[in-house]
């Protein structure tokens, strides 16, 4: 029988990453959708970088920056007791960066597509920005939120290069399913590799299918 | 009294346009801003409500200062008590009609306000529907009701009736007049229908390129001084036909077409699409009860 640990680890990573990303992405997307600031293009570029950057590049720099040999990595380690390389926490951090555009873009588009009269009507009715966000804006972009959640989740499951660079291959800590597949193939255990692959394939298929069924053609615009 | 002085450089179709207006509004009156699209009417409403900041100006409403650029006072829209009916209504799609109204309640305000408004504006049958299931006229009524929940000091309606057919329009005009009187509101309406302006408003401001061209009572503003007509309607020319030495002009007045015989000198520069006044002097109309 196959070792379930890499799969469990993969889904744990994807789940935690997605939840944290949702919290982080909403303010970023809100800001990007509404700002007229001149630094908007810069921030937009930074958010989108993971789309085009080889994952190994991102992983490499994270590895360098968070290495205990480096001042920042050393400081985190000594003062906060956090070690971001070759650890599960590090994987979460890297995954958040890596999947950021997949969460931010749909939500930003959702905010931008809402008629501005909704926000304005709410303000004129005496409601604060926060109330407006939670009672009016977010409930009206549910399809965008769902798209963001699913894409970020699916994208985190599919991570390989970043994980390999910053996490390595430590069973139970950083050995996620995609790494396990690579590992098994290298050891010529095609059977086990096939099981992992098949399970990932099936789960990814089901997740995406659910979104298409729920959201109609909504996802198409973001999945290229 | 409401004093409004506003100045703002606006970006218009042909370069920039300076909006520069000075308006005084009597409390409890219904005034209309009349003018072509792009004249700056909506911008005026947006500045009064605080959604748009003017370059210079001041707004005082019943002795309260909402805006004074010199003293750097700029109340947020949340703190100005205005009711705003947006051109696209701005109803919240995630809430039912009733929830839209309940959302507008202030902390501690009684829910009876909403129940009462649902009664007044006859939304009882619609209250559990989502906005997407409503017709244009129904959305309009919901938006109107929602704007009234906070009992605004100024009610503003941005071309509320432009998307409606004539029957619906007349009905909604009556609703607006009804709530205007019932809640003793001060109301600002944007319209570019002369008949609507005449029916609805106490005072009209004609806005052209960001300036007030004329102001006064609608009849004063839209008719020329020398006319002593006892009997007059405003309408739109839809057809001009020449027959021998005279012209037959078809005019749409309200929902009725009227054919008028005109001489060449009367026709002058009148063309299809022009707004005209049909007036008759020195004759005695018959008044009969309709059974």
Image: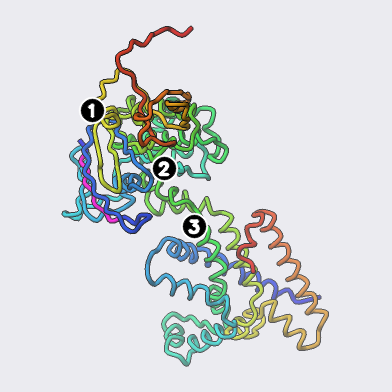
Q: Is residue A199 above or below residue B157?
A: below
Left or right, residue A189 beside residue B104: right
Q: Is residue B30 above or below residue A109?
A: above
The main secondary structure of the magenta stretch is strand
Image quadrant for the N terminus of chain B?
top left
- Measured from the top left, where is residue B212 in percent x and y? 25, 42
Q: Which element type, helix, strand or loop, lies under badge 2? A: loop
Tell me the distance, in whole angstroms, between the alpha carbons under discs 2 and 3. Answer: 19 Å
Label 2 environment density (alpha carbons within 10 Å; few <14, some 14–19, many ≥20): many
Q: Are marks 3 and 1 on the same chain?
A: no
| Mark whose residue sits in front, 2 or 3 | 2
- Measured from the top left, where is residue A123 in percent x and y? 37, 48
Mark 1 belongs to chain:
B
Q: Which element type, helix, strand or loop, lies under badge 1? A: loop
Label 3 environment density (alpha carbons within 10 Å; few <14, some 14–19, many ≥20): many
Mark 3 belongs to chain:
A
The residue lying toward the viewer, choosing from B86 and B259, is B259
Instruction: Residue B1: tell me if it is visible.
Output: yes
Residue under label 1? B225
| Residue B8: in magenta span | yes
Q: Is residue A2 above or below residue A134?
A: below
The residue lying toward the viewer, choosing from A128 and B197, is B197
| Mark whose residue sits in front, 2 or 1 | 1
Q: In the rendered structure, which segment of residues is drawn in magenta? A: B3-9
Residue under label 2? B86
Residue B264's label in the rendered image is none
Residue under label 3? A111
Q: Earlier in the sequence, mark 2 or mark 1?
A: 2
- Measured from the top left, where is residue A36 in percent x and y? 38, 64
Circles 2, 1 touching at the beta carbon (< 8 Å):
no
């Amino acid at each position: 029988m196959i070792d379930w640990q890499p799969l469990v680890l993969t889904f744990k990573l994807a789940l935690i990453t997605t939840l944290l990303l949702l919290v982080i992405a909403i303010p970023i997307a809100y800001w990007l959708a509404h700002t007229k600031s001149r630094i908007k293009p810069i921030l937009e570029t930074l958010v989108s970088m993971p789309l085009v950057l080889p994952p190994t590049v991102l992983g490499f720099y994270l590895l360098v920056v968070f290495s205990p040999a480096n001042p920042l990595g050393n400081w985190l380690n000594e003062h906060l007791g956090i070690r971001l390389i070759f650890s599960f926490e590090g994987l979460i951090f890297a995954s958040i960066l890596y999947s950021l555009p997949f969460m931010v873009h749909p939500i930003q588009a959702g905010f931008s597509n809402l008629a501005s009269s909704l926000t304005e009507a709410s303000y004129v009715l005496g409601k604060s920005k926060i109330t407006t966000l939670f009672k009016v804006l977010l409930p009206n972009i549910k399809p965008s939120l769902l798209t963001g959640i699913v894409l970020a989740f699916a994208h985190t499951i599919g991570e390989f290069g970043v994980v390999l660079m910053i996490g390595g291959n430590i069973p139970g800590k950083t050995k996620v399913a995609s790494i396990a597949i690579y590992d098994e193939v290298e050891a010529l255990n095609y059977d086990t590799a096939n099981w992992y692959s098949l399970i990932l394939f099936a789960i990814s298929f089901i997740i995406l299918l659910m979104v298409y069924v729920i959201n109609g053609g909504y996802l198409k615009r973001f999945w290229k | 009294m409401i004093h409004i002085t506003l100045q703002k450089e606006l970006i218009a179709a042909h370069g920039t346009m300076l909006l520069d207006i000075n308006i005084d509004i009597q409390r409890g009156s219904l005034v209309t801003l009349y003018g072509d699209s792009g004249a700056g009417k909506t911008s005026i409403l947006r500045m009064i409500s605080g959604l748009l900041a003017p370059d210079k100006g001041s707004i005082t409403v019943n002795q309260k200062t909402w805006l004074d650029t010199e003293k750097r006072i700029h109340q947020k829209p949340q703190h100005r008590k205005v009711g705003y009916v947006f051109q696209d209504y701005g109803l919240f799609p995630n809430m039912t009609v009733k929830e839209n109204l309940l959302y507008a309640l202030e902390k501690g305000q009684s829910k009876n306000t909403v129940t009462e408004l649902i009664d007044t504006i006859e939304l009882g049958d619609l209250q559990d529907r989502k906005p997407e299931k409503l017709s244009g006229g129904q959305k309009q009524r919901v938006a109107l009701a929602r704007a009234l929940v906070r009992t605004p000091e100024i009610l503003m309606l941005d071309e509320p009736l432009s998307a409606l057919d004539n029957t619906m329009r007349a009905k909604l005009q009556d609703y607006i007049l009804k709530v205007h009187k019932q809640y003793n509101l001060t109301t600002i309406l944007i319209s570019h229908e002369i008949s609507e302006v005449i029916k609805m408003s106490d005072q009209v401001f004609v806005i052209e390129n960001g300036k007030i061209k004329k102001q006064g009572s609608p009849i004063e503003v839209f008719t020329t001084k020398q006319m002593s007509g006892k009997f007059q309607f405003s309408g739109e020319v839809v057809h001009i036909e020449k027959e021998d030495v005279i012209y037959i002009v078809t005019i749409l007045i309200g929902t009725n077409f009227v054919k008028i015989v005109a001489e060449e000198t009367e026709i002058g520069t009148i063309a299809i699409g022009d707004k005209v006044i049909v007036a008759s002097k020195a004759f005695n109309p018959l008044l009969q009860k309709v059974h």
